[in-house]
Image: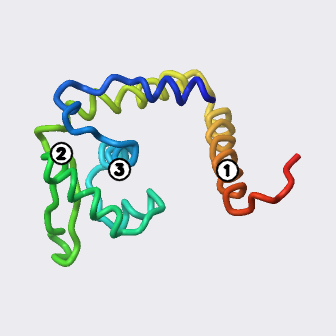
Amino acid sequence: MPRVVGRAKRLTVPEELRAYALAPRHLSLLAYLLFDGPMAVNEIAARLEVAPATVSLMVGELDKMGILERTPDAADRRRTIVSITDARRDAITAWLGQGAAAWRKALAPLTDAERALFTGTLAAFERALVDREENPSAEYP
């Protein structure tokens, strides 16, 4: 697992994005928007497990950089929809899409049951980390 994380951290940031000094906190937000499409601030906050105000600040930063844009929701003008700008979509796709392509290649030979086992195991690992954070004195086998 440390090698996988280390390799992911070494993915080359496209030249046109290097000047923005994007932080790890921006990457998850960008990945959700890239792979799942435009969404409201509250939905992003729920996925990132942070406060909507935190997402609003990040979106504001990325909007000023020309990476994201905010538009009113046509169905509910009180909501704002966040999306990646057309001008930066190709660079973000080239960068973050590398991980998605690698996952597709790694998971392709697996059966549906094997994929479910693998993704379930990763989810269990994440839950165990959260449990450990919330209860650091608990004993684990």
- Residue at left 63%, top 48%? 126
**Residue beneath disc 3:** 29
How far apart are the two marked residues, 1 and 2, measured between alpha carbons? Answer: 32 Å
Residue 15: image location, x then y, percent:
20, 24
Seen in the picture, residue 52 relative to 28 is either above or below; the reply is below
Task: Identify the residue at image location x=67%, y=53%.
Answer: 127
Residue type at the position of mark 1:
Leu
Q: Position of residue 32 (x, y in %)?
A: 36, 48
Q: Earlier in the sequence, mark 3 or mark 1?
A: 3
Q: Which residue is mark 2?
A: 67
- Dot 3 or dot 2: first in sequence order is 3
Q: Which mark is residue 129?
A: 1
Label count reads: 3
User: Of 113 and 28, which appears nearest the observer?
Assistant: 28
Position in image of residue 101 (x %, y %): 41, 26
The location of residue 24, given as percent across then percent down, is 40, 42
Picture quadrant of residue 78: bottom left
Residue 127 horizontal side relative to residue 50, left or right: right
